[in-house]
Image (tube, grey):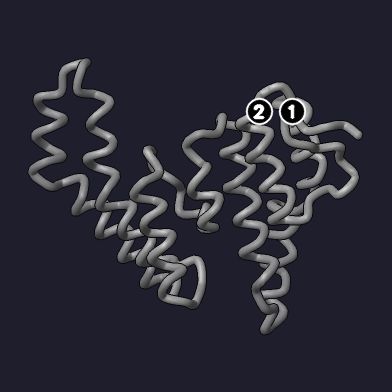
Amino acid sequence: MPTKRLALIGCLSLLAACSPQATDSTADAAPKTAPVEPAVTAAPAVKATAEAEPSTDLTSGDEEVDKARAAAGCPVPEDVYDVDDVRIYCAMPTDVQAFLARENTCQHFAGEEPYDDERRRELEEASAKYCEGREKIFTGLVARHRGDCAIRKALIGINSRYDLDFDLDLKPCGADPS
């Protein structure tokens, strides 16, 4: 089944890249139109990603992710599939974006079943790569972005979604310290 998803994503990406809109916009692109080009070519790929990798088994969950990706304002990697993470992704600095992709991947592998020894080894490797050190990385993000209220609010939401660090003194900006 994953091979079929990859093939579908690859075919749809090629289709999007080879569409008349994509070739017209790259051939006639002027510096002023460059910011518009990614939005035109990203829309088909974003839809394919949401269809190929739903975030939940419920249809409404797929629709929510699809809508959030369409409204995101930038291409959101397929690794980011939690609807709340998709909604905030484009407003975050690159280090927080990278953490969101890593954490979503960690959560994905954490929910997989080790149905045989080979799969168990794959899951252990994925856990080591994506899950180990996540609390330390998150704590670093909090320290780096402590002064930015919007990022701080997003980090509070991320912390509560993924139970990263209960001991952090992470309160919203303007919150009463008492």
- Residue at which label 1 appears: 174
- Residue at which label 2 appears: 149
Which residue is at 74% across, 65% downward? Answer: 124
Precedes in sequence: disc 2 or disc 1? 2
Which residue is at the front of the view, 174 or 3? Answer: 174
Which kind of residue does numbered mark 2 sit on? Cys
The reply to whether dot 2 and dot 1 touch (C-beta < 8 Å) is yes
Circle 1 packing at 10 Å, graded few (<14), some (14-19), many (20+), is few
Measure the C-alpha gap from mark 2 to mark 1: 9 Å
Judging from the image, what secondary structure is the residue with disc 1 in?
loop
The image shows residue 59, relative to residue 35, as above or below, that is below
Whole-percent x, y for residue 28 in the image: 9, 24
Whole-percent x, y for residue 83 in the image: 51, 56
Q: Quadrant of the C terminus?
A: top right
Circle 2 packing at 10 Å, graded few (<14), some (14-19), many (20+), is some
Q: Quadrant of residue 54?
A: bottom left
Q: Which mark is residue 127?
A: none
The extreme top residue here reads 31
Whole-percent x, y for residue 171 in the image: 79, 37
The image shows residue 103, relative to residue 150, as above or below, that is below
Which residue is at 43% across, 59% downward? Answer: 65
Frontmost of labels 2 and 1 is 1
Which residue is at the front of the view, 3 or 68? Answer: 68
Q: Quadrant of residue 127?
A: bottom right
Judging from the image, what secondary structure is the residue with disc 2 in?
helix
Which residue is at the front of the view, 80 or 124? Answer: 80
Left or right of 4, for residue 81: right
The image shows residue 171, relative to residue 84, as above or below, that is above
Whole-percent x, y for residue 31 in the image: 21, 15
